[in-house]
Image (spheres, rainbow, N blue to C red):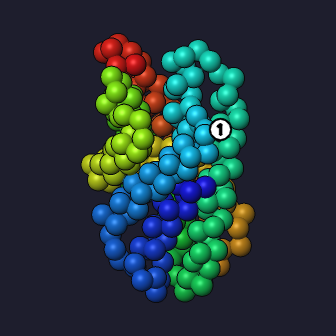
Amino acid sequence: MVLILFGNGVVANVLLTQSKGNGGGWMVITTGWAFGVLAGVIVAIAAGSNAHLNPAVSVALAYSSGSWATVPTYVAGQFAGAFAGAALVWLAYLAHWAKTEDSGLKLACYSTGPAIRDAKANLLTEVIGTFALVFVVVAIGAKAVGAAGVLGPLMVAFLVWGIGLSLGGPTGYAINPARDLGPRLAHAVLPIAGKGGSDWGYSWVPVVGPVVGALLAIIVAKATGLG
C-alpha cells in the first residue's frame, strides 16, 4: 500500500492537470518510485515481516528455496495492498481527475503502458528489468553487502531508481505484477471522473515479464555463486 501510494502518487502529481508537480518529468517519477520502495520496505521491516513487496520476488525466492508455503499469502497481501494504495491515490488527487481531459494520462497514474506497442519487445523489456532488479537484490544480500539496518533498503531504493532511469523508457518499468495489476483493477472499478478503458489487452505483459525475469535472475545468481 505504501509503495503504491508513493509510486502512483508521484505519477499523478506529474501528469494530472493543475497539480503543482505537473510536467515534472521522468526524473521526478523515477525518484518518487525509489522513495516509495524505500518507504514500503522500511514499513515491512518495522512490522517484523519477512514478506516481500513483489510477487515476482516471492515466486523466485520460493523457487530458490523450494518452499512455497507462504507464497499464496504473500501474493494476496501484495495485490490487496496495491489496490488499497491506488485507491488512496484517487482520493489524494480527487479534485484533479475531472480537470484532466486525457483519459490515457489517468490510466498512466495507475498502470504501465508501452511507449511503442510491441508485445514481444515489451515483454523482453520487463524480463530484463526484473532480472536486473532481482539479480542485484540477491547481490545486495550476499556476503553482507547490504548490512542489517537501513543500508539494505536504501540500496534497493537506489537500484529501483537506476532501473527506472536506465530501462524504464520502453514500458514504464512495472518489474512487479502487483504494482501493475492491482492499480489497474482499481482504475477499472473506482469512479474516476472521465476515465477510459483499463487496457486489459496489455495487462499480461507486466505480470508474465517480471515473473520470468525474476526466475532467470535466481537461476543465474545460483550459477554464479551469488544465490
Q: Residue at x 70, y 67 (%)?
A: 190
User: Residue 134 at what x, y percent from top left?
Assistant: 41, 33
Give the vertical position of 27 relative to 212 (above or below): below
User: Residue 51 at what x, y percent from top left?
Assistant: 59, 36
User: Residue 8 at what x, y percent from top left?
Assistant: 51, 62
Question: Seen from this angle, which residue lies furthest front?
Answer: 149
Dividing the image into 4 quarters, which one contains the N terminus?
A: bottom right
Residue type highlighted by circle 1: Val
Left or right of 100 in this view: 75: right
Q: Give the residue number, with chain letter if any, for mark 1.
A: 75
Dividing the image into 4 quarters, which one contains the C terminus?
A: top left
What is the crowding at mark 1: few (fewer than 14 residues within 10 Å), some, or many (at least 20)?
A: many
Q: Residue at x 41, y 73 (%)?
A: 14
- The answer to which quarter of the image holds residue 71 is top right
Left or right of 93 in this view: 152: left
- Can see residue 135? no
Of 155 and 53, nearer the camera is 155
